Image (spheres, helix red, strand yellow):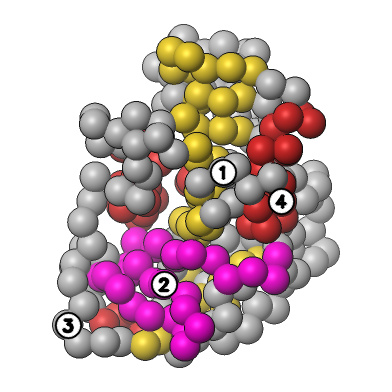
Amino acid sequence: MDAKEIIARRVALEVKTDMLVNLGIGLPSMVANYLPEDVDIFFQAENGVIGLGARPPEGMEDADLTDAGGGFVTAVPGAASIDSAMSFGLIRGGHLDMTVLGGLQVDERGYLANWMVPGKMVPGMGGAMDLVAGAKRVIVAMVHTAKGRPKIVPECTLPLTARRRVSLIVSELAVIEPTEAGLVLRELGPDASVAQVREATTADLIVEGDVPAMALA
């Protein structure tokens, strides 16, 4: 398994039956491919769909059925299309049980930066700020480093998405929970060690006893 598949499979275990869940573009969208068979939920996309399914087989794409990033998706039985006002009403009204978002940085406070890099063109902030502020749980799904540089840092140097502590960080090396006391190392990725995680992380980590290996869907 590559890093992204490890992350998606671990995040899939956080999804529980009857949840309304938003998946961000890119890596987070892969979570839909690894849900346990006994989990019955609806995925929401801010562009106006409730009931997203996994990516369709090649050749079966529908140009009118995409996620918020323009990626092709399927629709599950009972899916519905809604307008943007309703979609963001669900997000801002606190009706989302969970959102899974990519990340550029997360710091020791549990604050996320994921919407822009200064000096680089971006199409817009999208729904990330609303999602981090409005969802009941916020899970950051991201590779642990970028071009050798740690992404879990003492303090974000990139613009923050929101001043709210995220619920969980899942990388290919670790599952880390931001708490009031700091970042707690909860699980280790396949073949990863505590020393390896520390080396790839510039933020302080709290390690409590033996850290178990992460389970994967």
> Could you tell which of marks 2 and 3 lies nearer the N-terminus?
2
What residue does disc 4 label?
130
Q: Secondary structure at mark 1?
A: loop
> Could you tell which of marks 3 and 1 lies nearer the N-terminus?
1
Tag 4: residue type? Asp
| Mark 3 → mark 1, Cα distance in angstroms | 34 Å
> Could you tell which of marks 4 and 1 lies nearer the N-terminus?
1
Q: Residues within 10 Å of mark 4 (few under 14, many from 20)?
A: some
Query: Left or right of 124: which side holds 75?
Result: left
Q: Secondary structure at mark 2?
A: strand
> Could you tell which of marks 4 and 3 lies nearer the N-terminus?
4
Tag 1: residue type? Leu
Report if residue 46 is visible in the image. Answer: yes
Q: Residues within 10 Å of mark 2 (few under 14, many from 20)?
A: many
Query: Left or right of 157: which side holds 210?
Result: left
What residue does disc 2 label?
177
Residue drawn where x is 57% and y is 86% of the image? 154
| Mark 2 → mark 4, Cα distance in angstroms | 21 Å
Query: Left or right of 217: which side holds 155?
Result: right
Q: Secondary structure at mark 3?
A: loop
| Mark 4 → mark 1, Cα distance in angstroms | 11 Å
The residue range painted magenta reads 162-188
Q: Nearer the viewer, mark 4 or mark 1?
A: 1
Please state the horizontal and vertical placement of residue 46, each as a whole percent of the image. Answer: 67, 35
**Quarter of the rendering containing residue 172:** bottom left
Q: Are marks 3 and 1 in contact (CB under 8 Å)?
A: no
Q: Secondary structure at mark 4?
A: helix
| Mark 2 → mark 3, Cα distance in angstroms | 16 Å
Please state the horizontal and vertical placement of residue 61, each as a whole percent of the image. Answer: 52, 13
What residue does disc 3 label?
210
What residue does disc 1 label?
96
> What number of labels is visible?
4
